[in-house]
Amino acid sequence: MPTSLTNNRTARDAVLKRVRKALGKAGNRTAARAEAEAYIAAHSHGPRPAMPADLVAHFIVRATDMESTVERVADRRDIPAAVARYLDALVLPDALAAQKSHAGVCWPEFADLDWAGSGFAIEGRPTVGDDRLGVTGAFCAIAETGTLVVLAGADTPTATALLVDTHIAVVRADRIVSGMEEAFALVRREHGRLPRAVNMISGPSRTGDIEQTIVLGAHGPFRVHILVLG
């Protein structure tokens, strides 16, 4: 674990220890955690839209609404070829043509794929800020809003999704959940605690601050392409 993350957790634990002491809550925390989880599980949700049975299809529609592009991929080994198809099909202005490069970075979980066989120079490392292409996974995705959920971690560097011009995210079809409530429940169930950061990505970066005109790529990727695996 990175030193900075360890230091942050140590400082947080020290603060919480003082709070528990002041509240007279010192002792076994297992029962308190179980009580809190039971309260969350029993807490009723507010009004929510009805969702179809096919969450994958609904996610694809909503992600497209958010200016992402989406392709389904049957096999993990097909990811490099799918990425190549997407990049080859991009139509960019001459001024941006240099960005259409088959070079970039990926999360460690994809470093073993045959990138070279599809004409790529992909490195399994975090971006240092000047990489054009970043390939990441996703913890899960939200069908209701077409949103990717990316958790910060040593093996899931979020900069790879935020500092590149083109972000390509791979999400498993069985990790597409109905809504944000289900996404956070999945985080709690699989991690026990929230990570340092939970990033919700709904399409390319955008802003309408200047004369209420939407501009893509204002403070993040110009393009988000999603590969739904399975």
Image (cartoon, rainbow, N blue to C red):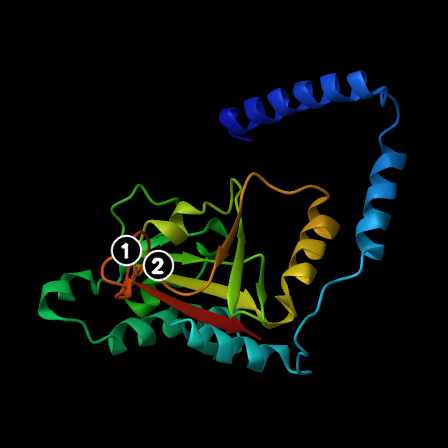
Residue at the far left: name it. 94
| Image coordinates for residue 41, horizontal then vertical, percent | 82, 55
Q: Is residue 73 visible?
A: no
Q: Is residue 8 left or right of residue 70?
A: right
What residue does disc 1 label?
218
Q: Is residue 65 above or below residue 161?
A: below
192, above or below 5, in the image: below
Q: Label 2 vs label 1: CA separation?
A: 6 Å
Reply above or below: 179 against 59. Answer: above
Tell me the quadrant of the picture where the C terminus can be found. bottom right
Q: Name the residue tied to disc 2.
A: 205
Spot occupied by residue 57 in the image (x, y as percentages of width and height): 56, 82
Task: Kindly check if marks 2 and 1 are in contact, taking CB atoms under 8 A apart as contact.
Answer: yes
Give x and y (percent) for residue 124.
Answer: 40, 49
Residue displayed at 81% across by 21% down: 23
Name the disc covering residue 110, or none.
none
Residue occupying the far front of the picture: 211
Left or right: residue 168 compared with residue 73: left
Estimate the x, y position of residue 1 in percent, counting from the top left.
56, 31
Under circle 1, the secondary element is loop
Q: Earlier in the sequence, mark 2 or mark 1?
A: 2
